[in-house]
Amino acid sequence: MEQKEKKKLNPIERELMHKFKGKNARKCRFCGTARGLIRKYKLQICRRCFREVGEKIGFRKY
Ligand SMILES: [Zn+2]
């Protein structure tokens, strides 16, 4: 029996890692909106998603 240890990544984390290497999109990578984008952290996500995702990837709301 083989025991493969697969790194379990959240869909969000996978998405992030995948798109970090990609081109810059001017819309939220999660919901697709172009409103309220936060490019501050090169995340390319909107404020709304940032609130949810931000915590998961280590950012905290101030
Ligand atoms: Zn969004």
Image (cartoon, rainbow, N blue to C red):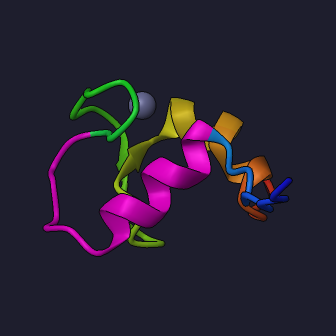
The residue sitting at 68% across, 50% down in the picture is 9
* Quadrant holding the C terminus: bottom right
Query: Observer-nearest residue: 50 or 12?
Result: 12
Query: Observer-nearest residue: 11 or 25?
Result: 11
Instruction: Count all numbered tags in the image, as a single digit.
Output: 0
Query: Observer-nearest residue: 47 or 8?
Result: 8
Which quadrant of the view contains residue 10?
top right
The vertical placement of 20 against 51, above or below, is below
The residue sitting at 44% across, 49% down in the picture is 15
The vertical placement of 27 against 2, above or below, is above
Does residue 60 appear to the left or right of 31 in the view shown?
right
- Residue 48 point in image, percent of width and height: 54, 30
As for residue 35 lying within the magenta part, the answer is no
Highlighted range, magenta: 11-27
> Which residue in the rendered view is the most extreme toward the front?
1
The residue sitting at 65% across, 43% down in the picture is 53
Which quadrant of the view contains residue 35?
top left
- Residue 32 point in image, percent of width and height: 26, 28
- Residue 24 point in image, percent of width and height: 16, 65
- Residue 60 point in image, percent of width and height: 81, 58
The residue sitting at 77% across, 50% down in the picture is 56
Which quadrant of the view contains residue 49?
top right
Q: Quadrant for ligand 1?
A: top left
